[in-house]
Image (tube, rainbow, N blue to C red):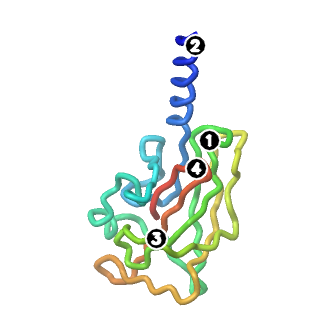
């Protein structure tokens, strides 16, 4: 019936909306991200709804090692593929949040379909020769993480 079809579509949409994961330290978030901090990056808004210019100099940065490797934490707020902690990543060396054309190598990824809510350490590396030039200090990069479920944020 039409009512059943409408209800099925509504349930599918609500399940998608409830699928959440965030990568910490998240740009514009103080402390550990919570469900309300989750973003859905897009081509038009690569860092979600976060105002990069207002947050780049005040957010907690991740320190990259001399070889460009760094660690972040992916946390899901529901289990299953919709709560994926498996990510892809791209870098904007200017930290303006506009151009994420260069892939970051993820050597330790999160669980693509976790059976429980939790966190995974993500180990990634900036491409060799990357020069970070953003922020008032002139040495910040911005990395966009996106889970296989389409959620994510900038770090």
Q: Which residue is mark 3?
A: 100
Q: Which residue is mark 2?
A: 4
Of the residues under marks 3 and 1, which one precedes in the sequence? 1
**Residue 133 appears in which quarter of the rendering?**
bottom left
Q: CA distance from mark 1 to mark 2?
A: 23 Å
Mark nearer the viewer, 1 or 2: 2
Mark nearer the viewer, 4 or 2: 2
The x and y percentages for residue 90 are: 52, 69
Determine the secondary structure under disc 4. strand
> How many C-alpha atoms fall within 10 Å of the one at disc 4: few (<14), some, or many (≥20)?
many
Q: Which residue is mark 4?
A: 75
**Residue 11 appears in which quarter of the rendering?**
top right
Q: CA distance from mark 1 to mark 4?
A: 12 Å
Q: CA distance from mark 2 to mark 3?
A: 42 Å
Mark nearer the viewer, 3 or 4: 3
Of the residues under marks 3 and 4, which one precedes in the sequence? 4
> How many C-alpha atoms fall within 10 Å of the one at disc 1: few (<14), some, or many (≥20)?
many
Q: Which mark is residue 82?
A: 1
Determine the secondary structure under disc 1. helix
- The residue at the point 41 percent across, 65 percent down is 60
In the foreground, 81 or 43? 43
Horizontal side, residue 117 vs residue 26: left or right: right
Determine the secondary structure under disc 2. helix
Q: CA distance from mark 4 to mark 2?
A: 34 Å
Verify CB contact (< 8 Å) between mark 1 and mark 4: no
Horizontal side, residue 106 vs residue 43: left or right: right
Of the residues under marks 1 and 2, which one precedes in the sequence? 2
> How many C-alpha atoms fall within 10 Å of the one at disc 3: few (<14), some, or many (≥20)?
many
Verify CB contact (< 8 Å) between mark 1 and mark 2: no
In the foreground, 62 or 145? 145
- The residue at the point 65 percent across, 38 percent down is 79
């Amino acid at each position: 019936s039409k009512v059943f079809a409408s209800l099925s579509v509504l349930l599918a949409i609500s399940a998608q909306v409830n699928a959440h994961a965030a990568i910490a330290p998240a740009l514009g978030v103080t402390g550990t991200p919570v469900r309300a901090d989750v973003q859905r990056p897009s081509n038009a808004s690569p860092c979600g709804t976060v105002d990069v210019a207002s947050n780049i100099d005040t957010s907690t940065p991740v320190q990259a090692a001399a070889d460009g490797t760094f660690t972040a934490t992916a946390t899901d707020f529901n289990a299953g593929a919709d709560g994926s902690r498996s990510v892809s990543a791209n870098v904007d060396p200017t930290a303006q949040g506009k151009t994420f054309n260069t892939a970051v190598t993820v050597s330790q990824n999160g669980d693509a379909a976790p059976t429980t809510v939790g966190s995974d350490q993500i180990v990634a590396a900036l491409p060799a020769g990357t020069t970070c030039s953003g922020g008032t200090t002139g040495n910040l990069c911005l990395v966009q993480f996106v889970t296989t479920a389409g959620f994510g944020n900038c770090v």
